[in-house]
Amino acid sequence: MTRSMSLGTPGSRWRSRALAAVVAGGLFFVACGGDDGGSTPAATEAPVTSEAPATDAPMTSDVPVTDAPASAAELPPPTGPEILVGMVNTEGGAGGLDFPDIRRFLEAALEYTNQHGGLGNRPVKLETCVVKGNPETSQACAQELVGKGVELIILGLDLFPDYKTYDAAGIPVMGVLPILAPDYTANALFLTGGNATSQAASAAMAKDYFHATSVGIIHADNAGANSTAASLEGALDVAGIKWNAVKGGDNETDAGFQGLMRQATENNPDVLVSLYSDAGCIGTMRARASLGITTPVITTNICADKDVIDVVGDDATGWYFAGLPAEKDTPERALLKKLLAPVMGVSEDDVTVAALGLGGLGYTMWMSFIDYGKKMVDEGIEMSGQALFDYLKTAKGLFLFGGNTPIACGSNAKYPAVCSFVFPFAMYKGDGVVGPVDDLAAVTGSDMLDSSPYLP
């Protein structure tokens, strides 16, 4: 069940969408693209004004990121004692539960940083244990990694983390995003907030940017999409926005998507939210355009993938993408392209935010840790798994790697394990270009989480 660190054979960047609707909320924020380009329509309304969680960092798209881990290229190899880190990730599970890119991208980043400063000046040895999407394998991995004496547990995607075993051994746990209810209140830290926070941000976008009083929701009728929709509906309830949800099949014909669009807009909602992914992105975009519907649509960043935009073109006009940061030419972007292009089996020019898929979560998490470790060294804090965990819970002015998303672990008492609540939004800007929403810095739905269905 354990594997040594290996980059493996590159495969399709979209291995599976079995959990896409569940984990689409774990959106990553890496400044790794090109200029906006294209036409720029006028702003719809004033910027979002929902309060951000407690943090010293302003919520603005122009926040400078200082001491970014890209400067690690200037650092010599680490000289401290080796730190043993355990990673748990779902791969090869039943029903398409297979997310190896999270591990593979993290391994690429780890291999690089082990030559440039390590984790807080400590070289890292990674022990990975694979789970299959059931409690038995999660428990077995916890026992195995604890037995190996790891200092820190990293969760890629694990539906059933064995928190009791980790707690009993005194080993801190940090992950890319919470998935199920116990994750949000566990003795753990997740750098992104999952469905609860992303869908709350979509509700905030509907309320504060579009000034919506009603929302139409379109999604597939499956467990993942129903769970995501429940988070959105709970947040809309807190926002005081009426909603109507229309469910369709996992795969619909053009006529089927048009029927869903007609149902979702029959009461003239102010905003639509689509939770479809991949082919569903194409189907819903084409259906809306063919019916002449102009109601703005909020969706996840999955629908901003180049493969989707290349097919639909200007049929994507009026679509807004949650969690997609501005594409910028930065040192962080250059480093990401250099490290991940060989793993993805593509040219560096093809490495974009939208192309990273869920694997980007693993890369972002590790490079964020490297950034925090560098800051700890600068502040005279000796690196250990527990010290890193404690640092994230108390330090101010931290951001996710390469972006402008502030880290504020535990700032929402009902979600003590969540570290980020702020989401950038992008929009289709014409001529095949997706770029930042005009006059909008970022969105937080932190004040709309009280009735989230994820709470126990």
Image (spheres, helix red, strand yellow):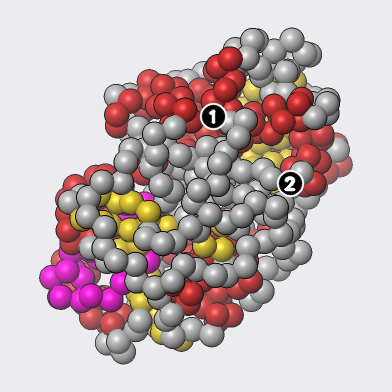
Are there few (<14), some (14-19), or many (20+) residues within 10 Å of tag 2? some
Residue found at x 63% / y 63%: 52
Location of residue 35 (image quadrant): top left
Tell whether label 1 touches label 2 (CB within 8 Å).
Answer: no
| Position in image of residue 40 (x %, y %) | 26, 58
- CA distance for labels 2 and 1: 25 Å
Left or right: where 217 falls relative to 309:
right
Residue 399 appears anywhere in the view: yes
- Which is more N-terminal, label 1 or label 2? 1
Q: Is residue 405 above or below residue 274?
A: above
Left or right: where 260 falls relative to 374:
left
Residue found at x 38% / y 20%: 342
| Position in image of residue 41 (x %, y %) | 26, 63
Location of residue 266 (image quadrant): bottom left
- Which residue position holds label 1? 106
400 or 346, which is in the foreground?
A: 400
Residue 165 appears anywhere in the view: no
Which residues are drawn in magenta?
284-305
Residue found at x 69% / y 27%: 374
Q: Is residue 269 above or below residue 426?
A: below
Residue that lies at the very extreme toward the left in this rendered image: 290
What amino acid type should be assigned to the residue bearing mark 1?
A: Leu
What amino acid type should be assigned to the residue bearing mark 2?
A: Lys
- Which residue position holds label 2? 396
Left or right: where 230 falls relative to 349:
right
Q: Is residue 249 part of the magenta span, yes or no? A: no
Residue found at x 56% / y 41%: 64
| Position in image of residue 319 (x %, y %) | 30, 63
